[in-house]
Image: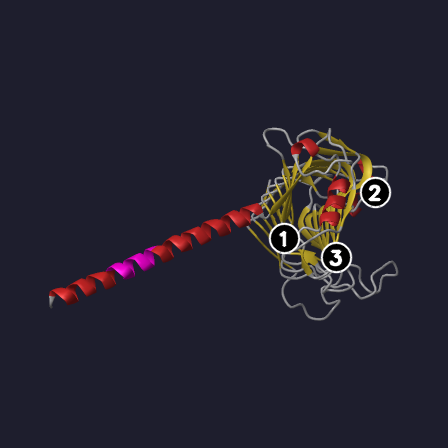
Amino acid sequence: MTFTSAVASRDTITRFVVTHLIAVVLCVVFVLSGTASLEAAVLKLYMSPTGNDAWSGLSEVEAVGTLARVHAVLKALAPVDVVEVHIATGLYLGQTVQWTFCNGRPITFTPLNFGNQRPVFDGQGADIWFGLSASAGADTNLRFRYLKVQNYNNAITFKGNRNDPNGWNGGNELYGMYFYRIGGRYSRDGSSTSAVGFQNSRNNRVVNSHFINVENFDASAGAIHALYVAHYSSGNIIERNRFADINGDPVKTRDASNDNRVVSNEFYRTGRDAFYLDAFCEASRPDCTKRSPECPSVGNEFRYNNLHGGYYGGVATFKFGGSSAACGPLAAPRLRTSGNVKF
């Protein structure tokens, strides 16, 4: 190789290295700027017991006082970004909201600077704390973290269209929540169906939460459940929760609510008849209010739960209501169980 060709080869190699170094630097800059953009694409709203609903909610010093105001702000702003609602510790009295705003991105309700104390929503006997109404057949992605909800007839309902299987909502999550004194015994209504209710609501998660003193008066104990999973509410996960002092059957599935998993929970003094109930309104009954016939749920699982006695005494692990053949041959067993321990 001549001296000239050697120099040319060295220059070619140098240009190659420099070109690729520039490409790597540009790639890193693009990734970092993309990450910063993702981090920036979060709308944060703030709530405080001393907040004012005349304020914007866009900073701690402009915190609003109610969830209803948070909802109004979101409806007005119509953000396409992730939303975080930061809730200061303290007591929020008599709040109730009917929620319809969803943008397909996560909307998280979480304590501000959470330590040992949760924000507490005390209904003072009101009907419901948080009611979602959404039936567009899309994930609503509401996420609730480490809040305490007490003294309501119902705490939360995720309501889709019970008459149309395609009119669902889903992808919601309750994590580390504390539901206390929920039901007719603690409200002005006198009777309740659930602490948390799912109606055509799918692929939700209820994890590491507490359901304590979920009670109707004894005459209507059979109507109340900590979790009522109804009307096409399928694919939900109920895991590592604590249920205590519930005078209705704590978990109920109803009407083609399939493939739900109730796993690794603790039950203490819960259930009128059973820890898990699957029942539906058969077409022959005159009191059914749904237009189309209801069907048994199938493919559900109840596994590895610790069962520490019923509310009034001994109860069954599970119970079925309604004929398994009401809608023809079952596509799967109504319930699969394993690993449950009765104490």
Amino acid carrying label 2: it is: Ser
Amino acid carrying label 3: it is: Gly
Q: Which residue is mark 3?
A: 160
Q: Is residue 72 above or below residue 20?
A: above
Write the residue at 56% across / 48% down. Answer: 304
| Whether residue 103 is visible | yes
Q: Is residue 82 above or below residue 332?
A: above
State the image coordinates of residue 43 (x, y, percent, origin top left): 63, 45
Which of these two is toward me, 284 or 5?
5
Amino acid carrying label 1: it is: Arg
Q: Residues within 10 Å of mark 1 (few under 14, many from 20)?
A: some
Give the residue furthest to the front: 4
Which of these two is toward me, 128 or 73?
73
Q: Which residue is mark 2?
A: 191
In-image side of 7 versus 38 (left or right) = left
Check disc 3 and report its element: helix, strand or loop.
loop
Instruction: Say which label, 1 or 3, has the lower sequence index.
Output: 1
In-image side of 307 versus 195 (left or right) = left
Check disc 2 and report its element: helix, strand or loop.
loop
Q: Which residue is mark 1?
A: 105
State the image coordinates of residue 215 (x, y, percent, origin top left): 76, 39
Mark 1 vs mark 3: give the one in front. Answer: 1
Q: Main secondary structure of the magenta part?
A: helix
Q: Is residue 96 magenta?
A: no
In-image side of 14 versus 261 (left or right) = left
How far, Cα to Cα, is label 1 from label 3? 18 Å
Query: Which range is magenta?
Result: 14-21
Write the residue at 62% across / 34% down. Answer: 112
Which of these two is toward me, 170 or 277?
170
